[in-house]
Amino acid sequence: MQHRRVQEPRFGRYGELKASLPGVASNLLAERLRTMEETGVVERALGDAGVLYGLTPWGVELKVPMEALGQWGVPLLAAGRGDDEFRPRWLTLALPAILHGRTAAPPAESRLRG
């Protein structure tokens, strides 16, 4: 496997990924990352903080279909299932899909902390 040196992670370290995916077993996450690396969706790189994972240019192209899937799943997001875990950070991924094509009048700005 080839490693390239990067300064800024576009994705993050393994521990950060694991912490952002509650309930996902370590072996499953490692297996999925390995598969995505083998298929060219994710790349591993050496950074100052160790091994970093990032999306390849091809992986970045998944944004459009993932946003479409997010729009499709909005009713499920709104309803939830009582015991489902939710982290506000996840809204940064969902909001562009939820708000696609909509504008506020007057324009509004919001920020998430955390």
Image (spheres, helix red, strand yellow):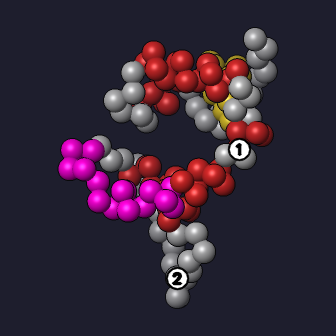
For badge 2, the amino acid type reads Ala
The majority secondary structure of the magenta stretch comes to helix
Q: Which residue is mark 1?
A: 60
Magenta-colored stretch includes residue 54: no
Q: Residue 21 location in percent, x, y?
A: 42, 34
Q: Residue at x 50, y 65 (%)?
A: 98
Image: 96 above or below 30: below
Q: Would residue 7 be seen by someone viewing this image from the given angle? A: no
Which residue of the protein is positioned furthest toward the left in this rendering? 82
**Residue 104: mark in rendering:** 2
Which residue of the protein is positioned furthest toward the top in this rendering? 1
In this picture, residue 28 sits left or right of residue 46: left
Read off the magenta span.
Answer: 70-84
What distance separates the C-alpha of mark 1 from that of mark 2?
A: 27 Å
Q: Residue 85 location in percent, x, y?
A: 29, 43
Which residue of the protein is positioned furthest toward the bottom in this rendering? 105
Image-quadrant location for residue 24: top left
Image: 78 above or below 18: below
Q: What element does badge 2 sit on?
A: loop
Q: Residues within 10 Å of mark 1 (few under 14, many from 20)?
A: few
